[in-house]
Amino acid sequence: MGASHSTVCSDPRTFATAISSVRDVEEGGKSWQTYDYVIIGGGSLGIWDTFPVVRAVYQPYLYHFLTQGLPVASLPHVFRKTEEYPCSSSRPEKDATSHEGVLNAKFPYGFPRLFKSGYDWNYETLSMPAIDGRASYWPRGKMLGGTSYFRKAEGYSPHPDYPQVNSALHGLNGPFSTSHAPHASITEDIILSCVNVGIPRVYDFNTDAGPLGVAHLVSTISPKGERTSAATAYLSSSVRARPNLTVAVESMVEKIILSTEGNTIRAKGVILSPSRFGPLFYVAASKEVLVCAGTVATPQLLMLSGIGRADDLKKHGIAVVRDLPVGQGLQDHFSPGPLFLRAKPGTTWDHILHPFGGLVAFVKWLMTGKGSFATLTTQVAFFVRSDNRSLPMHDGENKIPVLDLSSGPDSPDIEVVFAPFLAPPQGKPPLPYTGITCGAIVLKPASYGSVTLSSASAWDHPVIDPNYLGNGSDMALCIKATRLMLRIARTKPFSDRLNLPKDSGDTSAMFWPGDGDPDKVTDEQIEAWIRRNGQSTWHPTSSARMGDSATNSVVDEQLRVHGVEGLRVVDASVFPTQVSGHPCSIVIAVAERAADLIKGEL
């Protein structure tokens, strides 16, 4: 029946049954390592409450959760391997596949150092003509917690500087810490300038009035100054000590085994392997297989298992078990690109990006949990509607109409965030200037893309085509958002903190269009800049969408895959469409809802 005590395992011989081929499973007749639930994925949705005594899930590695003595298995993809440890409760708690051993995942300013590292899946999209033939880098977390009803999950810490926030609208006792982190003084001037152009000031985006307005952001940072992820919130040491939980890492889930009896298709378990050409192992699920591997890996695994569009599967020699639109409907939040504004010396936090200033800030955080390393990189944001004619973003030609895809008149379609320093590209050294980085986000894109297979192997990345700017409405939103950022930069008191030279007209310069004169910059110039610099904001969703029909969706309202028993999807891929905000809290809410659904059936 599986392990009887909580363990973290890297050797699949200790938690799975060795097989010579998939045919061994199909022929049956053997006794398999069996768990009630096999949970695939280790990110924000992988770690959730499957039962009052079970909280956990991972990415494409293997983790097992046992419900009241009966095993529950969870399998994420592959984490970096730095040490060998078998299935043992006495193994070192900190390791390369766990969030706990990764300092850059712990302190809030450390996450950029995880990009393109061994803790990153390092996905990359197709090259797209709409962004001048560039591909887009998509980081995805390769550790417990992933890329991580929110009030149920939230543990909000009130702050005396924010008496306007109504604590009754927040969860106070949940595992996910939220708080008001420190911010640079220049961010207050940014807020005042936003107010002066007509954006109302709010103190809490999370009210029933909606998020329209400008405010300092609430962080997912604990009172100790540490970053909260799904792993720290849901996979604490006490959870890992539960006697009915086994967490298995270092193995790739290659396929979900589906059985067909008459007209019934059912998920039976999963095939996994510790390496591309390594031995195969099987884990059986007596109740359900839950796929929580994320917007990229979830559709890939479903297709490798025979669930997907028939024509796509046949291209790779995969037998079609269930013809569903898996991988279709992909959406991501697109950004016009970082807009840089020169600032006067001493007004920003650029010093912490350099060796000495960063060391001082890090030591302070390490000793006290406070300071500039205990906060967010983007500290101020505003949400607006593009059809708000009172805001200064309509002075271009606006030849392309914007489609209103919002959920109502109080729902935004543009977000803009501000960071109190010049953010260098990934892997690049700090810039030799001081300044502010602004970034706009198209919240309700009209463009749809896809995730398809590149091969019949789980070890090969799938083909990611987000189809950025495929619909002209998205470009129109980008242009409006850029114009609004330029106007705010030239509005007091923020403009007094900036060093904006006269427009040089050099549209290829690093600080253009920030240096550009808003009265002279044309829509065509802004569009060309967007195509050169536009990028993902790393919020992909909707590649295994929820709906009521197998013709245009993959799962139903209970998160069950259409026409397949014992198989659910529980991650951002089930979103019917992109959300008008950052998806993390919605992901957590979906996970909590899935836990309630499963507990209600036990």
Image (cartoon, helix red, strand yellow):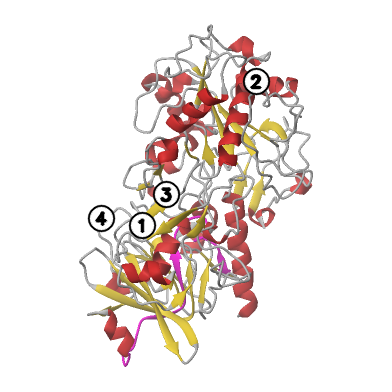
Asked if residue 437 can be seen in this view, the reply is: no
Q: CA distance from mark 3 to mark 4?
A: 22 Å
Q: CA distance from mark 3 to mark 1?
A: 13 Å
* First in sequence: mark 3 vs mark 4: 4
* First in sequence: mark 1 vs mark 2: 1
Q: Quadrant of residue 83?
A: bottom left
Tag 3, which secondary structure?
loop
CB contact under 8 Å: marks 4 and 2: no
Residue in the foreground of this view, choosing between 566 and 335:
335
Q: Mark 3 — residue?
A: 140
Q: Residues within 10 Å of mark 4 (few under 14, many from 20)?
A: few
Tag 4, which secondary structure?
loop
Residue visible at 42% across and 24% down in the picture:
353
Q: Amino acid at mark 4?
A: Glu
Q: Mark 2 — residue?
A: 488
The numbered disc on residue 462 is 1
Residue bounds of the magenta highlight: 28-50
Mark 3 or 4: the one toward you: 3
Q: Amino acid at mark 3?
A: Arg
Residue 536 image offset from top left, x and y in percent:
47, 41
The numbered disc on residue 83 is 4
459 falls in the magenta region: no
* First in sequence: mark 2 vs mark 3: 3
Tag 1, which secondary structure?
loop
* First in sequence: mark 3 vs mark 1: 3
Q: Quadrant of the N terminus?
A: bottom left
CB contact under 8 Å: marks 3 and 1: no
Q: CA distance from mark 1 to mark 2?
A: 41 Å
In this rendering, the answer to whether 387 lies above or below 290 is above
Q: Amino acid at mark 1?
A: Pro
Residue visible at 47% across and 26% down in the picture:
529
